[in-house]
Image (cartoon, grey):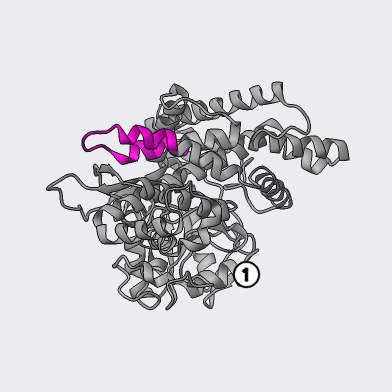
Amino acid sequence: MLKWSINIQTILAGMSIGLFVYYVIKRMRYRLPPGPWCIPLIGHYKIYSSPEFHLKTAALAKEYGPIIRLSVGPQTWVVLNDINSVLEAMVTKKTDFAGRPQITSGDVFTEGGKDITLANYSASWKLHRKIVGKALRNYLQGDLLENMIQDNMNKFLDKMAEEKGPFVFKEYMDLIIFHQLYTICFGEKRPVDDPEVKRFIKLDNDLLEKFGSGFFEDVFPYLRHIFTTAKWKKMLVLTEEVLNILRKNLKEHKETFQPGVNRDFTDSMLIAKQEAKDEGDEAALEILDDTHLVQTISNIFIAGADTTRFLIDWFVYFMTRFPETQAKCQEEIDRVVGSKQLSMKDRGNLDYTEACIFETMRISNSVGFGIPHMTVCDSQVGGYDVPKGTTVLINYWALHHDPKQWKDPEQFDPHRFLDENGKMKPTKPDSWLPFSVGRRVCLGESLAKSDILLICANLLQRFEISLPEGVKPNLECHMKGFGMEMPPDYNIVVKERSG
């Protein structure tokens, strides 16, 4: 026992000395961005462990400038807090900052980086993204998306209409989005009370709770072999359950797949695999094996579900908080659409409603810091050196609340996105980046914008939405970790609109 204790102490002491020497050499070699002093090895624990990470880094930017350096355990992170530094890094030097850091928990969930979202920048990643983009376009062409949304919306709007008192809107939103994704990915229209869909929602919420606040093993990866936390063990179980659901559905699809018949997104990927096989494209086949396919579907499911449902939850919250804004949206919907079924063709005339959605994307912080970037080579931003392998974060809250870019940034004002004629401005403000920018811009941006508009417009076309009588809006949001803000818990009351 004594010998083992001495060995552990020796190892830790050696690691500490080695990291200290590395840190000194790095500081002498590079002109790193400024940042506050911290305890070696531990780093800026009170900052990176805080659910208000975005607010703390934005405050530091006022003291040190928009580009700040933080130590997260033995790792160096650089946080970009203004639009100029973000555009320089992600657009001007886009390839330099297109990597992804190897996060221990992410590596587990992606089965070794076999997905698109967390995979590092490489030739195979570019090919994988290209194939998925083509598959999405092929499947969602025509009026398929809007018919699918309308079908799902009608089922759950009918259920909402049966509510005679206050109810939690978020629970309906989760069901709408997950049922919709089941249809997109697997071509299935499941009953409203389907147990597998409900199980998937619970698993995703549980994983979000675990991922949102981070893992000790992510900061000190090597210690997971010495001391594994209960939280880490729980994450492993949840991850395997999610992947098993997707594996089961992929297996069933492969057994019923018919070349040339495209039932859903999974079929689109299987068709791409068949084409690669026919053409003898070994590079494409390598990223279209079962593991990659499951991970691709997982990206569509998890990323598509979470960003959409959280954003719409915020939108409905703002509609209850600002009933006069809701009334203006409904007046526009009545004038443009009337009582007929909403169509994608109506989108170009629903300017005020879309502006409210864009403003919701700005003022809410449902994306947090997004997915971390990593430099794939030595680079620079704002005159500072950013060494290869550095984790780089975009503080979207700072971008979307920058008083230099937005007048009264804390105010909900959809007119920011409208011209003097009440039409959507042809170009969005530079500092509005809910879908990120550069090489890692969201693959489903155009799909998400259409999807969210149709869902929100459908809700407002059918219902007047309000808080229960006597209840005032709660101005305190909930923090989910890593800068992600959620609206406060709230109930709504719906009243069917006439005609």
* Residue 279, image x, y percentages: 87, 40
In the image, residue 476 sits, relative to residue 175, either above or below, namely below
Q: Residue at x 42, y 78 (%)?
A: 420
- Give the secondary structure at mark 1: loop
Q: Is residue 401 above or below residue 179?
A: below
Q: Is residue 65 visible?
A: yes
Judging depth in this view, the residue of 353 and 204 nearest the camera is 353
Q: Outermost residue toward the front?
A: 499
How far from the left and from the top, in percent, is residue 211? 42, 41
At label 1, the amino acid type is Lys
> Which SS does the magenta portion mostly show?
helix
Q: Which residue is mark 1?
A: 93
Residue 87 x, y percent position in the rendering: 54, 71
Q: Quadrant of residue 195?
A: top left
Q: Vertically, is 484 above or below 399?
A: above
* Quarter assignment of residue 389: bottom right
Q: Is residue 173 magenta?
A: yes
Residue 169 among those drawn in magenta: yes
Taking depth in this image into account, of 383 and 430 the one nearest to the observer is 430
Q: Is residue 433 left or right of residue 171?
A: right
Residue 178 sits above or below residue 330 on the image:
above
User: Image check: 168 left or right of 107?
Assistant: left
Can see residue 232? no
